[in-house]
Image (tube, rainbow, N blue to C red):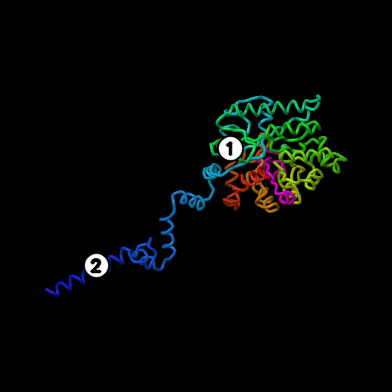
Amino acid sequence: MDRMKSMVVSCWIVLVLLAWGVLGLHSFSDASIPYWATLRNRNRPVAKKKSAILWTHTPECRVSRNTKEAGLYTFARAQQFHRKNLVFDWHVDTLYHMTKSWYDFRKGKPGRDLDVGKMRQSGIGVQVFVMWVPPRMAKHRGGSWRHLRLMHRNFGRLLRSTKGVLEHARTVADIKRIRKQGKIAALLAIEGAHPLEGKLSRVKTIAEWGVVYLGLTWNNSNPFATSAKDEWYRKGYRKRGLTPKGRRLVRLLERYRILVDLSHSGRKTFWDVVRMAKRPFLASHSDSYVLRPHYRNLSDAQLRAIKKHNGVVGANFYTLFLRKGRKHGQATTRDVVRHIAHMVKVAGIDHVSLGSDFDGIRVRPRGLEHIGKLPNLTRELWKHGFRLNALRKILGANSMRVLGAP
Ligand SMILES: [Zn+2]
């Protein structure tokens, strides 16, 4: 009987020991991994690590892990990336067309690059609408200023007609609030200081409107500064640059925290501003001169100056600035990437952004026919080797930094 008892006790001890080992109740290995698993994966430590990751990650993490693994190769993935992050475009000329002949922005118009549907498709978060006054308006005294005020009223009309989709933003805080509500932030800017008609007092008015940047010139020179086009084509313009009144304008803009845009300005104007600028400035819609020698593009020295002043350049999608030729389809999305990559190489990843120039360009690249095609650019940037953090900077974060600069 005693022998029977001791055999039963021994059996129990063996059973308990087995259960202890198999169920992983001991403390010699990772408590989250059962003993049998460590036995099976003894020679495969990677598998042991992987299973631990799968157990501890939340579903959101798994999604982002998958995004990283799969990349932004498809249009849908790039679109998803745009919606989750922030896409900021410094320059479209839509207001010019809407002022010329009004149309419903919700429905759009054939041949136009922007409307509500296309913007939603692009996943864009911030769009700067530029007011550009045709220089012929200056024929009548006060004509340019009157036209600018008309465009400003039309900006208000555009916002009213797209209530719930677009909302006017003046600051970084506005943008963040509007994005949280799932809406697109619409910003206002001016291309060319000629509508001020030489009057510095008008800066106060445009500041009240919430203008975020003023282009010192368009293709035409004005009482403040010389344009890149005049410097290139007209004799005697190369040495003009910023006038004394132009210097006062730059000081005033800085005081009102309106950014100075040098995209259309001549080289002399550019360097005159570089010498006096205390705040970051931008080139809202220009490409690289080294890749395409056009007077509207920026030399490497200019790109380095933008970097030094903590500013930003917005890559332009106009075929003519990307490569030689003006025919549709002659440039592709890859050409935009080529310019972005070069500008990043010269100015650094923190100083390049987007300035599409949509509705202001007659010839668009293949793959970027309108704003809705913007995810194609992100796909191409990914293919080129730009990764998530770099994309966040180029697509939005760099512009936000410059807009919010103290
Ligand atoms: Zn322009």
Q: Amino acid at mark 1?
A: Gly
Query: Any magenta on residue 321?
Result: yes
Q: Residues within 10 Å of mark 1 (few under 14, many from 20)?
A: many
Question: Is 268 on the left or on the right of 309, as rendered?
Answer: right
Q: Position of residue 395 (x, y in %)?
A: 61, 45
Q: Are marks 1 and 2 in contact (CB under 8 Å)?
A: no
Query: Any magenta on residue 173?
Result: no
Q: Amino acid at mark 2?
A: Leu
Image height of 268 relative to 104, above or below: below
Question: Which image quarter: residue 95?
Answer: top right
Q: Position of residue 274 (x, y in %)?
A: 78, 47
Inter-mark Cα distance, 1 to 2: 68 Å
Residue identified by numbered label 1: 372
- Label 1 residue SS: helix
Image height of 331 relative to 206, above or below: below
Residue plotted at (42% across, 59% down): 52
Q: Toward the viewer: 356 or 217?
A: 217
For the record, the magenta segment spans 303-330
Question: Which image quarter: residue 107?
Answer: top right
Question: Is 294 on the left or on the right of 376, as rendered?
Answer: right
**Ligand 1, image quadrant it occupies:** top right
Q: Position of residue 125 (x, y in %)?
A: 58, 39
